[in-house]
Amino acid sequence: MIFTSLPHGLSEKFASKCLAKGVKMIDLGADFRLDSAEEYTKWYGKKYEDETLHTQSVYCIPELHRANYTGQPIIGNPGCYPTSIALGLAPAISLAVDNTIVIDSKSGVTGAGRGLADNTHYPNCNEAFAPYKVANHRHTPEIEQTLSKLCGKKVNVTFVPHLLPVNRGIVSTIYFNVNKPVTAKQLHDIYADFYKNEKFVRVLDLGEVANLRNVKYSNYCDISLHFDEHTDRAIVVSTIDNMVKGAAGQAIQNMNIMFGLEEECGLQYIPPAF
Amino acid sequence: MIFTSLPHGLSEKFASKCLAKGVKMIDLGADFRLDSAEEYTKWYGKKYEDETLHTQSVYCIPELHRANYTGQPIIGNPGCYPTSIALGLAPAISLAVDNTIVIDSKSGVTGAGRGLADNTHYPNCNEAFAPYKVANHRHTPEIEQTLSKLCGKKVNVTFVPHLLPVNRGIVSTIYFNVNKPVTAKQLHDIYADFYKNEKFVRVLDLGEVANLRNVKYSNYCDISLHFDEHTDRAIVVSTIDNMVKGAAGQAIQNMNIMFGLEEECGLQYIPPAF
Amino acid sequence: MIFTSLPHGLSEKFASKCLAKGVKMIDLGADFRLDSAEEYTKWYGKKYEDETLHTQSVYCIPELHRANYTGQPIIGNPGCYPTSIALGLAPAISLAVDNTIVIDSKSGVTGAGRGLADNTHYPNCNEAFAPYKVANHRHTPEIEQTLSKLCGKKVNVTFVPHLLPVNRGIVSTIYFNVNKPVTAKQLHDIYADFYKNEKFVRVLDLGEVANLRNVKYSNYCDISLHFDEHTDRAIVVSTIDNMVKGAAGQAIQNMNIMFGLEEECGLQYIPPAF
Amino acid sequence: MIFTSLPHGLSEKFASKCLAKGVKMIDLGADFRLDSAEEYTKWYGKKYEDETLHTQSVYCIPELHRANYTGQPIIGNPGCYPTSIALGLAPAISLAVDNTIVIDSKSGVTGAGRGLADNTHYPNCNEAFAPYKVANHRHTPEIEQTLSKLCGKKVNVTFVPHLLPVNRGIVSTIYFNVNKPVTAKQLHDIYADFYKNEKFVRVLDLGEVANLRNVKYSNYCDISLHFDEHTDRAIVVSTIDNMVKGAAGQAIQNMNIMFGLEEECGLQYIPPAF
């Protein structure tokens, strides 16, 4: 079994070799996340070279897709933003009015990777804050793919990520109008019920607010629920550690699914770094 | 002439004394911002004690309301969030579909004031991030009052502020659907024209993104325009220094209006602190 | 068995009760650290109320004092600065020229405690840096007590702590002149040998530099050795996590000594916070 | 008149051209700081290519060397660390016991320059702290050159710089033993008198502690004086903004000297950046 984390476009060759040798693979890159070859080409500027490979892979946010894992040799490990957002929207997606979903996400600087760049040079991002790739981030089609499948129709969202001057963690503040009357309490009940058997999703009590501080160095996703009565708009705050639930931690969770282990195996203690 | 910055409910008495002595007053507190006595009571838990005082005051974001200043002895200096938001929405408010405005704001820690509190204790807010007073912040009625007057009908917004681990600066990311077809270029032209004579509002070129780093220690408001074509949603990023354009700097600008001076007088160089 | 962490002057009463009930106690406060009642009074402004209690307690940095634990019911858990400094100086204390030891320490903000204070208000300590209690910190007598006992004569040091804008971690940069010719390699060998059986002290390879980043959320003390040939001065950099090896982690290590457990028991994984 | 800020070894050619055209030059690089060609070669790995150029240049920390400026066409602008240290030691250098000077400096990240590097990648230096180039930094000979000239004999110092997770500012904590009895008050008087006519050096009142927060975005050097009676050691804390008094601000101050202008000309307001 192998974990891969390659720049997009490089995982297919690796996958071919794995399959030829009967080795399972969990890909932390973007090459096995999108069903649509056209969407992949549109956002990544490359074509799938071997489409049959993709029939042997499955995209898996465990809490939403573990039933889809039926022995495929390849798992496409989800992106960090899409994980925070899909977990934050899944329980209520059928409640959202079409085309009212706005997602304002903020990510710590490790989200930008280890490569050196002007925007992650300390004096440039410390004591600074701004969005980037406004409504134009590559994670948008991955987010819409998950949400569309969940509710059985095409879902469009506006997604704007921001660079947050902290080392790690993502907070996604998610807004949508509701298609039938709902109270904050009812909204909370829907989420609490949806995740009642999940170890890694914590639905906070009404009145609490999710804070990335409480999920750092863990595989948890914390979700708080809010309702703006004077605009009939639901507000969901979903936070994860982009390095754990948003990447390597979720990959381990997926490996546990792949091998029939307890999902929390190896995830109780996360060695801190950064 | 006197600047006051008092906890709400304490400015009226001060204002009475000023008026009795013929002294002009610019109030940085909340007591002269809201037209509606009911709204004031709803959000601040107090009543106006002397309503006649409020007929002698004017609320003034200079770029939007300077024409309203006709010699009143009291100016209600705007709040920090409302300044960043009203400037970011004013040019396009008639273009916004009713009840689609979502405002996701992030403020540096000086926005919470000098008073000691758990949430501003360094280890609690450093390497942390979360919203607060979700859809329940006192600046909401001030924002809606300004926007409603600008477009001549009641405007409701969803407003969610977040505490950002930097010393100073506010970034408001503002979302709304448009009621007629518009391109990013046209959106930009509308803003560029609206602010063409303003010294303190800089409409960035298309493709640029407003960053609080560029307005720190200045009275500028930087605005960048974006358009999400696949959801017909406009996105405006508006950033100010909460301590300058969001408070004392704007108060000086208002003083200049009050006394017929050049508005940029005393505002070219801001003494840095923090 | 009970851990106590009380403001100075309050632990004695608690200790009396523990002893009366046959309960062991590890005190994280300052009341059982100093042998000398006069020094205690000089620095803490109080007298020991029951000196016999202090004959039943032992001060214990495990790597230096575990042999001193002979069943006492009370352990005085060391201070954070003294731990980083004593571990950094112990192997070479007999090599230091009298009165040449200078200790320049820097501590993260959790070192100041949970209590709210002006100097830990975020905008006051973020993007700031300064020493405090210059050559006048209460940990000075504790440092000198440990060093004096180690080398059998009175050792005086200059100790200056600084407040570092990070959440956690202490770096002590320690300077002293050597009383006989020594190379960096020899200095390194002395330390490597001294700590060769220790699990929680890591003597870094020559050429490496200790960084608090590598000890955060752990019970490790990392030490790097340096030598300034043109002044015959040794430089030791010693870093710990003030919340773990500098407080609760070391208390657990001491509890393990008290009860004859493996010292690393319960210390392999530190639950991150802050 | 031209300011140059080139990597070492590139300024000489530029200086030749300037001299040929009768243009004055202030060099912010390292090529005109050291008198000794051997020291330059030792630390920078290059030789002076045209030694006559160096006879036409002068090194100038204005408060210490302005009398040395007698019309030279080239000024070697001092390094950031040497400025904070020389200003912190100059008044008392004759009071220091030989070979007891220890300098522990901490610099904000802009001190490392605009170039991208692993150690200035945000997640690597945020929430981290460590020394670098321990007792081996290129500014050491510049520091010793200034101090040696001030007291008329060779001065050796131990100098250890640290990377501080803030954008800007240097704090140098300087330790030395005194060669005759002195009180903190007397030490303070010596400094206050030495700098009594200086606009840009502020000797703080006894009991105050210099903090980089108060010199950010300014050309000030703040100095606080302390005395450790139990070791007869003086402690001086000297802080500057490395981007202003430690670089461009001091270059402007030197330009003012070069052209006979008031030294504070152009330095009252520093445009903030970062």
Image (spheres, coloured by chain):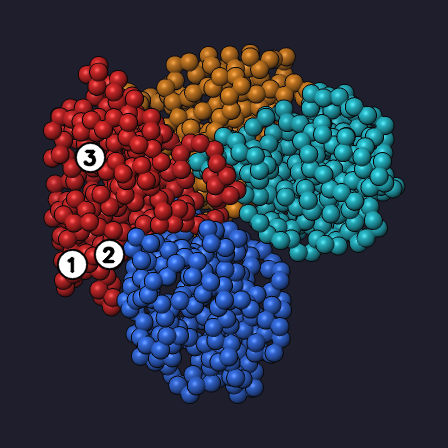
Chain colours: A red, B blue, C orange, D cyan
- Quarter of the image with the N terminus of chain D in it: top right
Q: CA distance from mark 2 to mark 1?
A: 24 Å
The mark lying in front, picked from 1 and 3, is 3
Which amino acid type is marked by label 1? Lys
Q: Nearer the viewer, residue D127 or B88?
A: B88
Q: Which residue is mark 1?
A: A185
The mark nearer the N terminus, 2 or 1, is: 2
Q: Earlier in the sequence, mark 1 or mark 3?
A: 3
Discs 2/3, front: 2
**Residue A248 occupies which quadrant of the picture?**
top left
| Residue D196 visible, this orientation | no
| Badge 2: residue crowd in 10 Å (few <14, some 14–19, many ≥20) | some
Q: Is residue A250 or residue C178 the one in the foreground? A: A250
Q: Position of residue A194 (x, y in %)?
A: 13, 46
Please tell me whether mark 2 or mark 1 is closer to you in this view.
2
Residue kind at label 2, given as amino acid type = Asn
Residue type (three-letter) at the residue carrying disc 3: Cys
Q: Chain of mark 1?
A: A
Q: Chain of mark 3?
A: A
Where in the figure is residue A82, as x and y percent of width and height? 27, 42
Residue at screen point 38% across, 42% down: A108
Give me the disc on residue A99: 2
Asked if the residue at tag 1 contacts the one at tag 2, i.e. Cβ–Cβ closer than 8 Å, the answer is no
- Residue at 67% across / 31% down in the picture? D7
Left or right side of D206 for A234: left
Q: CA distance from mark 1 to mark 3?
A: 30 Å
Where residue D33 sits in the image (x, y, percent)? 75, 32
Q: Which mark is residue A60?
A: 3
